[in-house]
Image (cartoon, rainbow, N blue to C red):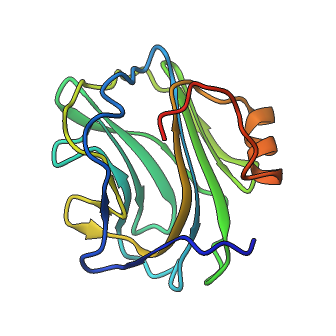
Amino acid sequence: RPFNGLIFDGSNDYMDCGNKIGVMLSATDGLTIEFWLKSPTPESGTRRGIIDRGTVTPYSVRWRDTNAISFSVLDGGVARDVVVGNKTTWVANRWYHVAIAYKLGKANIWVDAVRDNSSTAIFGIDASTNNLDIGRAGTSYFLGSLVLVRIWKRALLATDISALFASPYAPMGTRMFM
């Protein structure tokens, strides 16, 4: 896909989106975090933050040192991995569409509209007024480009994810935060 996107250097670049969104998110309503990413070193074995809701975060998307995307939540003050992707072989400098949908009891990660992994997860999402950061989680920074980062106040279905992959700029309703 010929996107431009935000470029992150992996050492100190990130975008602070403030704290207005996500305060209303809940595991019972569900949420979806969707974005396109490209990295020059996807198989580096380095943990990198992609999206994070602050230092003590109610939710976080990370590039793990196992070369997989993970989604974690803070539930009752305890950080818990909800779902970790495990099937995608990442290629350097290639755009990937990633979507993570979570609703109390079920979590899915899709890469290029193909389910990469799913899990049964019964974790809440702690309330927070922390800022939403794109390009970092804590002190781990993303190396590469991100574009079309969207957070939905509902768990999108596989058909929705496929539609967004096929037509990234198509509108998908009004229950979106950004």
Across and down, in percent, residue 36 comes to 60, 61
Instruction: Please report the residue visible at 41 percent of the width from the left and 63 percent of the height from the top.
Output: 64
Q: Position of residue 90 (x, y in %)?
A: 63, 73
The percent position of residue 127, horizontal first and vertical second, equals 24, 24
Of residue 149 and residue 101, the one placed in the foreground of this image is 149
Residue shown at 26% from the left, 67% from the top: 140
Residue drawn at (20%, 23%) of the image: 76
The residue furthest top is 28
Total marks shown come to: 0
Residue 126 lies in quadrant: top left
Q: Is residue 147 above or below residue 168?
A: below
Q: Residue 1 or 84: which is nearer the viewer?
A: 1
Residue at 45% x, 82% y is 44
| Above or below: residue 145 compared with residue 124 | below
Query: Which quadrant of the figure has residue 158?
Result: top right
Q: Nearer the viewer, residue 117 or 23?
A: 23
Residue 131 placement, left or right of 60 = left
Residue 163 versus residue 156 in the image, above or below: below
Q: Is residue 56 left or right of residue 79?
A: left
Q: Give x and y (percent) for residue 122.
A: 43, 20
Q: Quadrant of the N terminus?
A: bottom right
